[in-house]
Image (cartoon, rainbow, N blue to C red):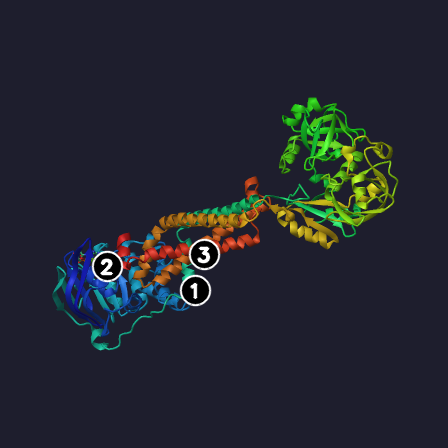
Amino acid sequence: MLRLERVSKFYSGNGLVSTGFSKVDLEFDTGEFVAITGESGSGKSTLLNVISGLDSYEEGEMYIMDQPTSGFSREDLEEYRKKYIGSIFQTFNLINSYTVYQNVELVLLMSGYDKREIPDRVREIIDKVGLSEYEKTKASKLSGGQKQRVAIARALAKETPIIVADEPTGNLDSKSAAEIISLLHQLSQDKLIIIVTHNYDQVEPYVTRKITMHDGRVVEDKRIAVRAAQAAEEKAVKTAKADGLTFGSMARLGVRNTFNIPAKFLLLLTVFVFLCFAVMAQYASFMNMGEMNTGGYNNYFSDTSKNRILITKDDRSEFTDEDYARIESMSNVDRIVKNDLMLDLVANVTDDPENGDFYIVSKIEELEDFEGKLVKGRMPENDREAVLFFPEGGYAENVIDMAYGKEAMLTDQNTGSDLMKDKVKIVGYGLLDDRQTEAMEEGGYYLEAYLCINEEGMSDVRMAALERYCTQEIHFAGHILDGNSASGMMPIRASENVPEGEIYVSEDIAALAQGSAAGSELSIVNKSLYFEDRFTFEVGAVYNKDNLKQYLNLDDFEAVSGTLFISPKDYSRMFEKGNFQSSVIVSDDKITAQTAESIAEAGYETFVVNDGVVSYAEGFDVILNTFRTIMLAAVLIVLFFITYFITKLILKSRNVYFSTIRMLGATKENCSGLLKTELFTVFNIAFFICLGFFLLVKSGNINSEYLTQLASFLGAGDFVLLYIVLCLMSILLAARYARQLFKKTAMNAYKEEV
Ligand code: ADP
Ligand code: MG
């Protein structure tokens, strides 16, 4: 059945070539019980390993069933081992963390036996080696003799025609040794048994042939007896099943391996939790970085917060309380700012814009929010009075002595134009509490105080704010002129001296009509983002330096030249639109767009202010994003290698396992598959631990400002993406590790580990 013709095995290493054995000619048949003996180093083990297909040979030819084996590929050798060879080792080579049952089951799984036929087969063989009561005992808990019985059961389970045993009794006491030899003899009547031993006496009663080796050569080959079976059954050599590990079995084994050494499992889990957490946190903070990069400006709004949605009604009419109640009840709506034009106004409070004693950068707030918070003075009683509220220790507190009791002007910080017709007197001030101070700092621009005026004063400011939004087209005598009150181009002003329906223009504008200005028609188209109205006037008077006093009761012609004067009633019609526009402030700015959509569905026009922001970075956005992505990839690669090296250390204990199952016939793909299953299982547990953790943070069950902020960048889509990335990472990790493992032959890998 098995024939060796002048087979030699050389070892080369460190530039030296040594001989394992040389020019061995041997022929073995079914039914033989062969003992190979000889002193230590004579080449017995080497010969046996070549016969087992665990080691290659360099010279000669080995035939199995008359088929040459020297050209066998790795796969051919794996199949050869599965079909023909059952191995028993001096060191038992059991999987210590497996039970007796699982150890025997393993070889059957690996040879692709059907799941249903395995249990009976395993129990039968365990019974034969006398270990029935230890079926569920872990291999590590057995005595040496019992371990070797498991090894015999394992070698016999798949019914190979050849059993090889290298010093099977070397680690046993003489009584156990005798039992083992007898058991082997008894259970393997119709097989070829090759036992390597340096204790020939032990096997003498059973052997049919004795081969003695010396210095790598066969020096004696003596046939002693012929077993009964040998004579009878010469012809039919039955080979063992040699299918591969099925996918189901691989998955089951992989999962078993994940949990069977708890300490290793926990260590791996810790590493993977670390990996998942680090990847998630990195990902979130890179998203966060992206948010911070996209600063920008908008020509109309200075408050471009992401949580601000501008709303108007379809017909541009004023909002009613019902409108507000309806919008306020929608989800994600935090509050509504009714006087929302104030959000975009930053007012300078100063005694003199040219060279004043104080310039306090302020925002105008509702009075009632600060009721009862005064430190000094009193609340405003008319539209000529104002109060200031500021944080302790800031600029405003330093200059308040100069401002208190004084008259101050309110000017728009953007345009420098007046926000109120008249000066206001600072009649009181107060200090902000910590929460208010924080809110002020978070506002996004540099503020020193809040200014409060009464409702009447507020409507002046609102009008001034609205003017800022508007541009005008003046149609006069066939010309179209552009104007904008806020920028000082042809401003429109109200004057008690102008009758309703009339307009007073200065002489330079009147000149366009070439003398026939008075009595002619002038129309103004007043436009904003939200409305466009046309007003038609009759030119009532043309004013100049000399008649200014007479028509308008004003003195300084230089200061007003170019201004168009209309009646206060017409002025209000043009600019006082009431609360036609408000802002909704949402609680979660990640879903501002969705909230805007639902408000729009409820019948309002919406505009997410931040969408209109022109990024400061402009074209650089693309570069910045690419850079961020590269950074993220780099971090992921670093994390991958950190995890790889830690995993490698932890899995070192797995090396014995893998080299053992390779000797039992596992292929490279099997080992790699098992490893992938194992890491994939641990990874999934780790991922869902981290996912659960972030969900707890999101739902507010875990309180940490930092974590909550990170978690807010992780939505369902991000978790899916991260899951895929991490899955790939864990499979890559396993593949890389498996490749390392297979750089060595099964035998060498095993020798290194034991
Ligand atoms: P035995 O089992 O009879 O004690 P071995 O078969 O283990 O002897 O060894 C035979 C010869 O091969 C010895 O000289 C030994 O040093 C050499 N040898 C065995 N394994 C290796 C190896 N992996 N590398 C180099 N030399 C080896
Ligand atoms: Mg040996």
Name the secondary structure under disc 2. loop
User: Which label is found at residue 728?
Assistant: 3
- Residue kind at label 3, given as amino acid type: Leu
Q: Nearer the viewer, mark 3 or mark 2?
A: 3
On screen, residue 107 versus residue 22, left or right, reads: right
- Residue kind at label 2, given as amino acid type: Pro
Q: Residue furthest front?
A: 514
Examine the image and state in which quarter residue 164 appears: bottom left
Question: In 3D space, how far apart are the residues under numbered discs 3 and 2 (Cα atoms)?
Answer: 44 Å
Label 1 CA crowd tier, 10 Å (few <14, some 14–19, many 20+): few
Is residue 139 or residue 578 the one in the foreground? 578
Question: In 3D space, how far apart are the residues under numbered discs 1 and 2 (Cα atoms)?
Answer: 33 Å
* Contact? badges 3 and 2 (CB < 8 Å): no
Q: Nearer the viewer, mark 3 or mark 1?
A: 3
User: Visible in this render: residue 214?
Assistant: yes
Residue hosting label 2: 168
Reading the chain from its start, which is encountered first: label 3 or label 2?
Answer: 2
Label 2 CA crowd tier, 10 Å (few <14, some 14–19, many 20+): many
